[in-house]
Image: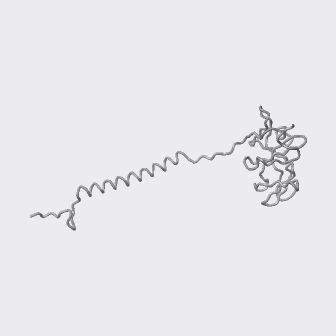
Amino acid sequence: MNTRKEENEPGGTQMGRRQFLSWMVLAWSAFAAATGGALSLVLRYLFPNVLFEPQTSFKAGFPEDYEIGIVDERWKEKYGVWMVRTPEGIYALSTICTHLGCTPNWLQGEEKFKCPCHGSGFTKVGINFEGPAPRPLERYRIMLAEDGQILIDKSKKFQQEKGEWNNPESFLTV
């Protein structure tokens, strides 16, 4: 007489080979998934996100491309620069309001820059004359490249209140 309960009988205490292998496969799969998840977090830590900043300098075409007395907005969206040509030369104005950093709009009919956020107004040369802006717009370094094109360097800014607009690099004589 067999006193041991068979594995198929209810209340059986022994585990068969197939059931054992199924549990082992399940356990190793869970272990591999947990290890893979932890390893992916470590790799994510070792290779963080990289922010790609826009270029700080760019070529803005030839001086002949700009009309005298006109504020050129072709670089406003891409580089945040207005190009202004006067009879004396060309300068590059920053499109960042000196109050809280909004982007003013050029109003051709009124011949002024007007900030939509808090109402600051700037003349064509960038001088603040209305609203809460504490100082004029900044100018960027401007020069001629070797190929005769205008080169704007946004890494160098010139502030009027510091007397830096007199610097020859803040204005391109043409």
- Viewer-proximal residue among 8 and 165: 8
- Viewer-proximal residue among 24 and 146: 146
| 86 to 20, vertically: above or below | above
Q: Which residue occupies 77% across, 38% down?
A: 151
In this rendering, the count of numbered labels is 0
**Quadrant assignment for the C terminus:** top right
Find residue 120 and report its image quarter.
Answer: bottom right
Find residue 17 and report its image quarter.
Answer: bottom left
| 64 to 5, vertically: above or below | above
- Expressed as whole percent of the image width and height from the top left, the position of residue 52 reads 64, 45
Left or right: 110, with 14 as reference point: right
Q: Which residue occupies 73% across, 46% down?
A: 79
Tell which residue pokes out farthest to the bottom in this image: 10
Tell which residue pokes out farthest to the left in this image: 1
- Viewer-proximal residue among 128 and 123: 123
- Expressed as whole percent of the image width and height from the top left, the position of residue 81 reads 77, 47
